[in-house]
Amino acid sequence: MSVAAPSGALLGRSGLPRVPARTLVMGVVNVTPDSFSDGGRWLDHDAALAHGLELLDQGADLVDVGGESTRPGAERVPVDEELARVLPVIGALVGHGVLVSVDTTRAQVAQAALDAGAVLVNDVSGGLGDPDMAPLVAATGAAYVATHWRGPSDVMDAADSYGDVVTDVRRELAARLAVLRAAGVRDDQVVLDPGLGFAKSGASNWPLLGRLDELVADGFPVLVGASRKRFLGTLLAGSDGTPAPPTARDGATAAVSALAAAAGAWAVRVHEVRASVDAVRVGAAWAAARRDGEGR
């Protein structure tokens, strides 16, 4: 990826640091009936608000609110329904002093969420889902997560075909950066996400984690979203080959959080916050010890 490292102490106008003292932890609130990990648990407004505040109490640095499932095979919801799900929750969390990101591929939803006080747009399509997204991000100066993506949920598994997955993902993210820059988005607004699970149904995820330092070396903050995903369920499968269910993947998720932190990830996106808060501290201590040892 031929890109210059962005300058600036803050990520866009979010108030979040571009280079935090430790890897940040983003907690997840799915205001949906059908998310793969916890569909329906937080669909009710009061339940979603309580869960967001619980994640904050557990140590989350920000809370990611989404109103449309991106699990494999998920169908789209009407934009009005997505807005009705997320806006009251975002407004309430902001009112309690929570830093909120919105998980959406739609510029209309992103704009409404920013107006309600969200500080970051987490777009799993990297702008491919809505041509109005890049101009919106440029106009607002919002922090923006551009995720590697090859198509919507109903077709993404068929797009799991790579030469070298790390090289291909870096190249395709560079193409998204070019589009963002052409629309006027500043480099210091952007976080990159390798898109674990998106057009990566299984083994393609592991090289992206094992070589995460290569993505970090490109100079942009990197978000890692491995939490409870299928490839972890496959790794933890029982003796009969049945994948571990989503909530049984939290220990593995925390392990990924530690390793991601040691590799220099900007943030990890997780459903179970407390263990990952501890894990990123372990990762930071590990990385510091390695640097000290190499300096001798």
Image (tube, rainbow, N blue to C red):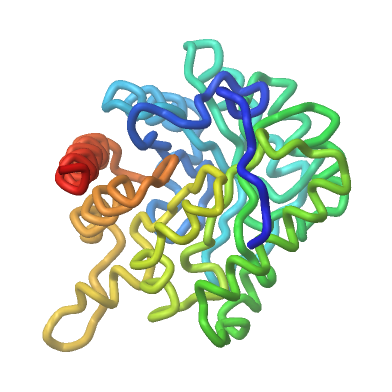
Q: Is residue 40 left or right of residue 295?
A: right
Q: Is residue 274 visible?
A: no
Residue 208 position within the rendered picture, expressed as x and y whole percent measured from the top left: 43, 68
Q: Residue at x 44, y 40 (%)?
A: 266
Q: Quadrant of the N terminus?
A: bottom right
Q: Residue at x 18, y 40 (%)?
A: 292
Q: Nearer the viewer, residue 263 or 146?
A: 263
Residue 185 position within the rendered picture, expressed as x and y whole percent measured from the top left: 79, 39
77 versus 122 height, above or below: below
Residue 209 location, quadrant: bottom left
Q: Is residue 134 left or right of residue 288?
A: right
Q: Quadrant of the C terminus?
A: top left
12 versus 217 height, above or below: above
Q: Residue at x 39, y 45 (%)?
A: 268
Extreme residue in the left direction? 239
Q: How many marks?
A: 0
Residue 14 position within the rendered picture, expressed as x and y whole percent measured from the top left: 61, 23
Q: Residue at x 69, y 60 (%)?
A: 174
Q: Nearer the viewer, residue 145 or 210?
A: 210
Q: Is residue 211 left or right of residue 290?
A: right
Q: Is residue 117 visible?
A: yes
